[in-house]
Amino acid sequence: MKTPTINLDEIEIKPITNQADFERASALIDALVDADLIEDEATRNKALDILEAITILAIDYEKKHFPIEKLDIIESIKQRIEMLNLSQKEVAEYFGGENRVSEVLNRKRPLTLKMVKNLYHGLGIPAEVLLA
């Protein structure tokens, strides 16, 4: 990749305080997303530093203005099972049997630590979601 078409020396890094700032930052992030492919080392390092700084500011703005609702544990499990196109019978081993799958998914039985470990390892559901 050649030097980016934007002039890195003209980029001003400042707090993102409104939607217009956020949109400019997003456009800049898009322009610099492949900065690691820049051939010139000094230019690459500068572009990557700018990319990191702008990304941190954009993430901070997103967290404050577009908070993500905390996922419901059971809904997260159901979504993952659906995404993997699995049946309750196919995931029964992670819960300790077919009856337990139904009980947990219908909120009649709480998740156990063993179930959490099995779901984490078997279905790749992040532990922070399962333990929330």
Image: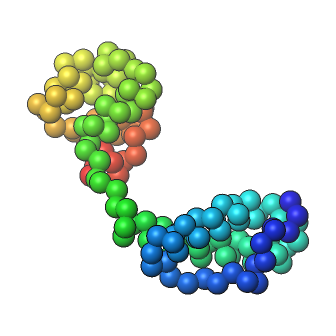
- Residue at image coords 29%, 54%: 69
Residue 77 found in image quarter: top left
Residue 45 in sight in this render: no
Vertical placement of residue 116 versus 69, above or below: above
- Residue at image coords 40%, 20%: 86
Rendering coords of residue 30 (x, y %): 66, 61
Residue 83 found in image quarter: top left
Rendering coords of residue 121 (x, y %): 42, 37
- Residue at image coords 35%, 52%: 128
Vertical placement of residue 33 versus 64, above or below: above
Quadrant occupied by the N terminus: bottom right
Rendering coords of residue 32 (x, y %): 71, 65
Q: In this view, does 49 lie to the left or right of 125?
A: right
Q: How many labels does the image show?
A: 0
Q: In this view, does 11 lie to the left or right of 101?
A: right
Residue 25 in sight in this render: yes
Q: In this view, does 105 lie to the left or right of 118?
A: left
Q: Is residue 39 left or right of residue 44?
A: right
Q: In the rendered view, how is the structure colored?
A: rainbow
